[in-house]
Image (tube, rainbow, N blue to C red):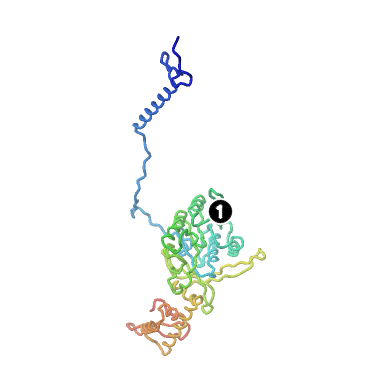
Amino acid sequence: MSPAQPGPGSPRAPVLSLLPGAPALSLADLEAKGRAEVRAHLRSVATQSTPRPTAIAAGVTLSRADGIQPEPVAWLWDGWLARGKVHVMAGAPGTGKTTAAGALAATLSVGGLWPDGTRAPLGDALIWSGEDSPGDTLVPRLIAAGADLRRVHFVASMTDERGPRPFDPATDTGALADHLAGIDPAPMLLIVDPLVSAVAGDSHKNAEVRRSLQPLVELAQLRGVAVLGISHFSKGTQGRDPTERVTGSLAFGALARVVLATAKLPDEQGGGRILVRAKSNLGPDSGGFGYDLEPLELPGYPGICTTRVLWGAALDGSAWDLLSRADTQTDPEAQTAMDDAKGFLSAMLADGPVPAKQVQSEAKEAGHAERTLRRARAALGVEARKESMAGQWLWELPKGAKGSEPGQP
C-alpha cells in the first residue's frame, strides 16, 4: 500500500513539473521562487547605470552692456503714451478721466489726431472697466468720440476649471498676456479702470502694490502694449507733488513711467478742465492741454445721452503750477490761504517794487507757504525784474494783466 498523498489543499501538494523528470512544485514553491527572482531582478536593476534628467542650475544671469542694442522708445503719442510701458492717469472725481482715456482709445482706433495735432498710429485698444458698463456708458462715449468700434475690445470674462466668471485684473493678468500672444497684430493700448483693482493686497503698502502690478508691467513689455491705469487723487493732498497725490501707495506713481493728471479749473481761471503731464521717466515732464466735456444726445440713438471730449489749447508750465490753479476750487482752506497771500502781496507791493528776497522773507514770517505765495504771485501777475545787471531781483504789481516770466525767482 502506497503512502497517503497530501490533500488538494495542502501547501505541499504537487501541482506542476517545470522540466521533464523534474520533481513537481507546489504553489508555495512557485511563490517563493517568484519572489526570489523578482528580488534578484531588482538588485540587478539597482546596480545598472541609468541616465538621469539634467538638473537646471539655479543662479543669476548677467547681461553685459556691450551686448545690448540701444533702441528708441516706441511712442504711440510722442511724450505721452509709450508702448511697453505702464502709465497712470489720476485726478479728482468729475474731471472726466475715463472719458478722456476713452477719447485716446478712439483716436488710436481711427489713426486720428492727438490733442497736440500729431497723427496717431492705427491700432486696436482694450478696455477693462470695473466701474462703468460698456452698453450704457462706454460704447456711447466711444461712438461720440468717433471710434472705430471694430478696433476697440472689452476684457469681459475669464474661463477657468469652474467655468466663466468676471475677469479680475488682480489674478488674471497673466492669462490675458497669454491670450494676447495669439493676436496678430497685438493691441497697442490697454486701459485698466480703476488701476487699484489690479492690486490683490493692501493698496497702501509699497511692496504689495509693486508685486501686484508686476504682471501688468510684464504684459506691457512682452506684448508691446501701452497700459493706462485710471486712478484718483487722495483727498486733502492739494499743494503736494502730483505723483504723491495718486490714491494708495507711492508705488503707483513710482512704478508708472508716465503719470498724467486731470483737474477742473475754477471759473475765475477760465473754467474747463486740464490734462497735465505730472511725471515722465521717458521725456519731458511738464505741459498739458485744456479740454471740455460736452454732453450730447447720441446721433442715431434716440434717448441715449453721453459726453465727449473737446480738446483745447496746449498749456505751458509744470504740473505743480498748472494744478495749483485748480486746487483752490476744490479745497476751501487752500482758497482762504490763497486769498490771504494775494492780500499780503497786494499790500506789500502797493507802493512800488520791493526786493524779491524781502517779500519772500516777510511772507514766511507772516505764515504764508512758499507754494501759496507762488500761486498768489501768478494769480496777481506780479512781475519780476532786475534792478541792474548785477543788482537784485525786484517784484512789482503789473500795470496790465500779465504773468511772470518763467525761470525768474
Q: Residues within 10 Å of mark 1 (few under 14, many from 20)?
A: few
Residue appearing at x 39%, y 78% in the figure: 408
323 vs 270, nearest the viewer: 323
Local secondary structure at mark 1: strand
- Give the answer, above or below, for where 13 lies relative to 383: above
Q: Residue at x 42, y 71 (%)?
A: 241
Q: Amino acid at mark 1?
A: Arg
Residue 243 in view of the camera:
yes
In the picture shown, does residue 1 fall above or below 83? above
Q: Position of residue 247 (x, y in %)?
A: 47, 67
- Residue 231 location in percent, x, y? 49, 65
* Place of residue 262 in the rendered image (x, y in percent of width and height, measured from the top left): 50, 69
Residue 386 location (% of width, % of height): 36, 83
Number of numbered discs on residues: 1
Q: Residue furthest left?
A: 390
Q: Which residue is mark 1?
A: 165
Quarter that holds the N terminus: top left
Residue 282 seen from this side? no
Give the residue drawn at x 42%, y 14%: 20
Q: Is residue 60 above or below residue 392?
A: above
The answer to whether residue 110 is above or below residue 23 is below
Foreground residue among 210 and 77: 210
Quadrant of the rendered structure where residue 387 is? bottom left
Pick out the residue farthest to the right: 302
Report the residue that reaches farthest toward the top. Answer: 1
For the C terminus, the quadrant is bottom left
Q: Residue at x 40, y 82 (%)?
A: 367
